[in-house]
Image (cartoon, rainbow, N blue to C red):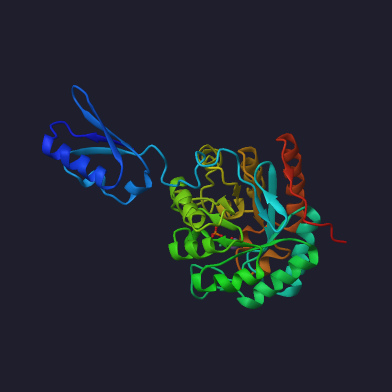
């Protein structure tokens, strides 16, 4: 960390800053220039993160050398991480194709959609049992019954499953059923929830908050990693924009940007980013072309009857066509769609 002092900082102020650094067990190296004095701080930077150095009189600027998202950073782990979701690999050239309805609605519906996405080549099945709805009057999900249905159907088709957990008190319950937790956009900064899934050893799909910066997303990942759970997969799902024609603004640049900062796999969710089936396939392919490690798509066999997000669901045949294009692009990029853990008849 480098501390830049204000012009005219007194010797007493300088001394005080050095004393504060010493008290933290760090070393201060002074460099006096003609116009400015700077202090290089040597030692464990994490000790300084909760110290408001910028509030000390005489300090103009505090410049960290290492990012605050230490464990998530590329410096900590220069090679791409590969996250294993019950046998399906994500990252390091392995692509996830996550598909399924927004919400688990019934055993029959879940079965039909799973059969369709599996035959199209999806390798992880999704479905929400606890739904974060803007309106308290909207369908809130089937709860534990939904988890049971998703688990059964996943097992029947040999597909790992991912489902959202919204409440730290439900992590234990959801963990009994799922192969991967989903932390939704609205909960990206629910720190007790992040800590709780961090204590689990099941992988976590962490969605970017709709108003969160790329660094905010990495700081949230850090919460999970700091608890010892290394299985974090990031997800770009669109941020709030000013244009009302699409549901959100798909920030495709976040994908290569995250690759410069972090070793964690990053997938894209063009369903929630776009909110319209007519532009989802193009954005899915753009995400892959930008370096994403997977694509997350909502699919429904009768969108007009869907309990949530029917307006953005791809029909099974639209998904099958997209899946074929994704495989073609993956080959071009030298990546492979992770096979299902074991062939199921
Ligand atoms: C979802 O995956 O259905 C969902 C609610 O996503 P997000 O948290 O990205 O809005
Ligand atoms: Mn949804």
Residue 77 visible somewhere in the drawing: yes
Asked where in the image residue 155 lies, by quadrant, the reply is: bottom right
* Image position of 96 with respect to 135: above or below: above
Residue at 70% x, 59% y is 86
The answer to whether residue 278 is visible is no
Q: Residue at x 60, y 70 (%)?
A: 174
Q: How many marks?
A: 0
Residue drawn at (74%, 46%), measured in percent from left and top?
Answer: 337
Q: Name the residue nearer the viewer: 70 or 254.
A: 70
Residue at the location (71% across, 73% down)?
149
Q: Residue furthest top?
A: 34
Q: Left or right? Give the position of 23 relative to 12.
A: right
Q: Position of residue 162 (x, y in %)?
A: 65, 62
Q: Residue 272 at x, y = what percent?
A: 57, 55
Q: Position of residue 153 (x, y in %)?
A: 75, 69
In this view of the protein, which residue sits in the foreground, 217 or 295? 217
Left/right of residue 206 with respect to residue 34 in the rendered view: right
Q: Quadrant of ligand 2?
A: bottom right
- Compared to residue 170, the image places residue 319 above or below, namely above
Q: Residue furthest right?
A: 345
Q: Position of residue 47 (x, y in %)?
A: 34, 48
- Residue 229 is left or right of residue 241, and the answer is right
Taking the view exactly as shown, the residue that stands out farthest to the bottom is 145
Give the camera-side residue of 7 and 112: 7
Compared with 87, 69 (above or below) is above
| Image quadrant occupied by the C terminus | bottom right
The N terminus sits in image quarter: top left
On screen, residue 181 above or below 291: below
């Amino acid at each position: 960390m480098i501390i830049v002092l204000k012009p005219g900082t007194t010797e007493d102020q300088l001394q005080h800053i050095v004393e504060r650094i010493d008290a933290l067990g760090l070393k201060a190296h002074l460099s006096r220039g003609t116009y400015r004095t700077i202090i290089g701080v040597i030692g464990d930077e994490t000790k300084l993160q909760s110290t408001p150095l910028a509030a000390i009189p005489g300090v103009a600027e505090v410049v960290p050398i290492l990012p605050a998202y230490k464990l998530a950073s590329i410096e900590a782990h220069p090679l791409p991480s590969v996250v294993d979701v019950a046998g399906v690999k994500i990252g390091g050239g392995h692509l996830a194709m996550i598909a399924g309805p927004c919400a688990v609605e019934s055993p029959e519906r879940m079965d039909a959609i799973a059969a369709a996405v599996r035959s199209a080549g999806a390798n992880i099945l999704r479905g929400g049992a606890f739904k974060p709805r803007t309106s308290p009057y909207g369908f809130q999900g089937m709860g534990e019954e939904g988890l049971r249905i998703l688990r059964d159907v996943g097992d029947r088709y040999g597909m790992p499953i991912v489902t959202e957990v919204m409440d730290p008190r439900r992590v234990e319950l959801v963990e009994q059923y799922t192969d991967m937790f989903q932390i939704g956009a609205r909960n990206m900064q629910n720190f007790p929830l992040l800590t709780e899934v961090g204590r689990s050893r099941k992988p976590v799909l962490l969605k970017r908050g709709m108003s969160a910066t790329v660094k905010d997303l990495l700081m949230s990942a850090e919460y999970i990693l700091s608890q010892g759970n290394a299985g974090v997969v990031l997800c770009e799902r669109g941020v709030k924009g000013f244009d009302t024609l699409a549901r959100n603004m798909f920030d495709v640049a976040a994908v290569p940007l995250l690759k410069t900062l972090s070793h964690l796999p990053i997938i894209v969710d063009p369903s929630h980013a776009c909110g319209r089936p007519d532009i989802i396939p193009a954005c899915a392919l753009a995400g892959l072309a930008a370096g994403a490690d997977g694509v997350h798509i909502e699919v429904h066999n009768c969108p007009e009857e869907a309990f949530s997000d029917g307006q953005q669901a791809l029909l099974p045949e639209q998904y099958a066509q997209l899946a074929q294009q994704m495989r073609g692009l993956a080959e071009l990029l030298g990546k492979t769609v992770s096979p299902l853990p074991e062939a199921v008849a």
